[in-house]
Amino acid sequence: MPILGLPLALIGLAALPALTAIYWLRTRFRRQEVSSLFLWSLVAQAHGGGRRATRLQTPLLWLLELLALLLLAFAAAGPRIPRADRVVPVMVVLDDSFSMSAVQDDGYTVREAGVDAITQELGRLGPFTARFVVAGPAPTLQEGAISRLADIESNIGDWRCESTSSSIGPAVALAREVGGPDCRVLVISDHPSPDAQTPGEGSEAEQEATVISTNNTTDQAGRLRWRAVGQPQPNAAIVNAVRSTDPQRDQVLIEVANYSDKPFSATMTLSASAGADSKTGLQSDTDLGQSRVIDQRTLDLAAHETRRLRLVPPKKSETLIAQLDDDALTADNRAVLLPPAREPLPVAVSIQDPVLFKAVRSAVQASGAASLETNQPRLMFTDRVRQGPASPPTDSEIDTATTSATSPDDRAATPVPWRVEFEVPEAEAIDAYLGPFVIDYNHPLAAGLSLTGLVWAAPTTESGLPVVGRAVVSAGDVSLITERNLSGDAKSLRIRLRADRSTLLSSAAWPVLIANIIDWQRVELPGLSRVNARPGMPVRLRPNTPVDYVEVMYHPLSGALTEEAVKRIEVFNNVAILNSDRPGIYHVSAGAESHLYTVNALSPEESDISMAVTAEHGLWNDERALRTDYRGLAWILGLAALSLLALHAWLQYRPTGPSSAVNSEATT
Amino acid sequence: MADDWGKPIADGYNAGLGYALVRPSRTPAGMIGEQLGSHVGSSVEFMDYREYTPGDDLRRVDWSVYGRTDRLVVKLHREEVTPHLDILVDASRSMALADSDKPASVLGLAGALSAAADNARWSRRLYAVGEQNDQVPGGEGNPQGWVWPGFDSRQPLGATPITAGLKLRRRGVRVLISDLLFDSDPWPIVSRLAEGASALFVIQVLATQDANPPWNGDLRLVDSETGLLREVRLDSGARDRYLQRLQTLRQQWSGACRRVDGRLIEFIAEDLAAGWDLRPLVERELLRLS
């Protein structure tokens, strides 16, 4: 700590020249004529002045006072020495984002530079005990603690640097919680500390700074040390890869970005492979089976340009692999897109109102996840509202809704379709509602739904049918959309709407509502909810046959086989929720059936390593660390100063005899 | 006589007019004069008888005694003398210490002794002792006619024999006036002065700063005689040691004086010049009230 920050020490130091000035003023010689000098011969000659140059000699008392002041000033500065028995607890937070796997100019990865930084930081501490927190999408505390530098690498095996985001803020909070008030926190990352960034530099950094500072209390200030070990480099990356879920219209959208201040040429190769079979899993230990190049092109990207590519796969059943040339960061150079696993949802529409009929059909077709040409509907839109106990639709309803003939046996095997019933009132018995509309956003139907500014015409309270079930959307005390259960797992949705008196059908909320209804039902279908997922996005698996658990095996995006342990996921209500943070290919086994889904490393923030830095921020020598790790010397210095002052007093006031006259005089 | 010293000499002389010198126990010798001496002389004052021996003046035979006792005895009479006072004044520069009344006191004291000598009808001489021991011109007469050579001697008093070049009167009373602040054994000086003297008085005249240095702190002391420098740090302890040394010096001089039946008399110049209180001289039997 700077000396200016220690007022007492500053005062003590200021006293030194003051004391010297006092002595200097006192030792100025006044000329005095005397009758004779011989009587003064026994009076010792004063030193420190005079005309002749003599060896510098200073009064002992002045030296004692100067030394005492110096000791007191030093004591006021709070000097400390390390405790012999101290063991410094350290929590190391490791940025697990895949940008940490970038290869630097020297051939080492950022992760390896981070290991070196950890070794340096821990090596300076003396005896230590360190634990590690891997900051992926969620912080993960590593088991065990180390006290030797040689054990670092063996304890950070889970630090793979594959995540598409890093929760450093929560990881620091976890580290402080686990480490306790006396621990020090070391953050290893490739971007600078949020505290070191100027405000407004980045929203993510601001949020992270907020999280970290929220956990920063006064006595914890200074316990966080941030080591950024990155290196700014150009990088071309696949930042988005989407494959249509509609098997009838298989399309691929790929976005390639150039994170560089200079134009960049990248060759993108699109391959198709039949090796990734959900039935048999991955067969090869090198890649996704036999693949063939179906497209290869050179992309001349301007600085910071993002290029969109739309492609149509030749076969909808093949796995597509998009691959860029290797560069500093290879994790974002490959994307694997599996073919859609589910067929479109069969939907029937049985509505008399031509306006509403047309609107429903158009919205169903636009969803891309449903098909109207089916004879075994899983979802039925109708304007026949049934009251009383829930029951499956009648045959006449199904006949009216479908265009293909179906046999009675087929109908018997068909599961009960979900119903969406439109209650269409007479024109004279409606009330038009302008809002505000109360939406239950916990319901799947409410995802992305906004009714602000719409006119919704619904039956009046007197004319409408009795409302049964849970309200999803309501206007005041009038329920507009309600949900109720039918027999089995089927559900019924009633929408009270007069279409020609409402603006709902001509708004963006209409296709959203219909798409939500279709997805609401689709998730209830057996199989995976999606096969091309993003990191952190939950994937739901409904096995065809009830099982207690499913087993998940991870493979990297290259398709190579690994020896990682199979993870077992419990199944509740015949649904397994699979959370996948690591980019890769996941093989899921549920009894006799198996499924595949991919998680691609798509993260523009992590792919942009042009802002990576090598920097240090924060010091560990805070007040608490000083108290716990160091022993104060102030009391020793104080005692020494007191001893000097006692000696000073003895020298000054001791009885002066003839034998001691000279010494006493010299020290006066 | 320099005008600078006229007033203190006159002040001292006036102060001494009320006193007379005390004849010491050992009768001073001197030229034939008005006072009886301690030796046999030719005065009318009967002193003693003794047996006649051949060669005695027949005029001094007491014939009446011879008639009664048939013995020849000689009648002895005291001699008649004129006692003498020699005043030796230290002429070193230390006697004219700046910011002190030492020169005025010393010369005033010489004037007072001269007045006391005149009152006692003693003859007197004034000497300036220093590098050259000289008789002060006019020193036998009226103090107003003294031609004092000044306090210019750079040589301490004991550097040369104090009586060298001086024709001190035998059996005279000798008075040395000095501050005695020189590093020399007092015995040679005192013994030389006492040799042939009927009485010896040493008067030490110190300035107040000589007797009790009032300063504190660091001082660059300058010797008024030699000009040498000495830098000292003065405090109570150092002052005590100085006074101890001064007391030792006085004891040495006092002891030396006792050995020759002389006396040491001390004055503080400023006190003396302030009131010309000569009682210490009376107490030491150098003066008496006239």
Image: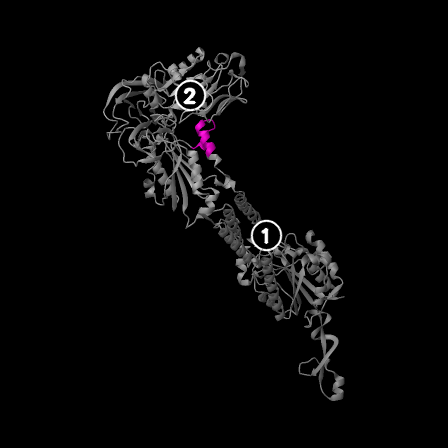
Which residue was labeled with disc 2? Answer: A419
Q: Quadrant of the C terminus of chain A?
A: bottom right
- Label ID, residue B217: 1
- Please tell me which residue is depicted at 52% across the width and 44% down the height of the picture: A9
Secondary structure under the numbered disc 1 in the rendered image:
strand
Residue A125 versus residue A430 in the image, above or below: below
Magenta span contains residue A207 = yes
Q: Nearer the viewer, residue B142 or A475?
A: A475
* Residue A244 x/y as whole percent: 34, 20
Q: Nearer the viewer, residue B287 or B195?
A: B287
At label 2, the amino acid type is: Arg
* Residue B212 x/y as whole percent: 64, 58
Query: Residue B200: which quarter of the image?
Result: bottom right
Disc 1 from disc 2: Cα separation: 113 Å
Nearer mark to the viewer, of 1 and 2? 2
Residue A447 versus residue A112 in the image, above or below: above
- The residues colored magenta run A193-211
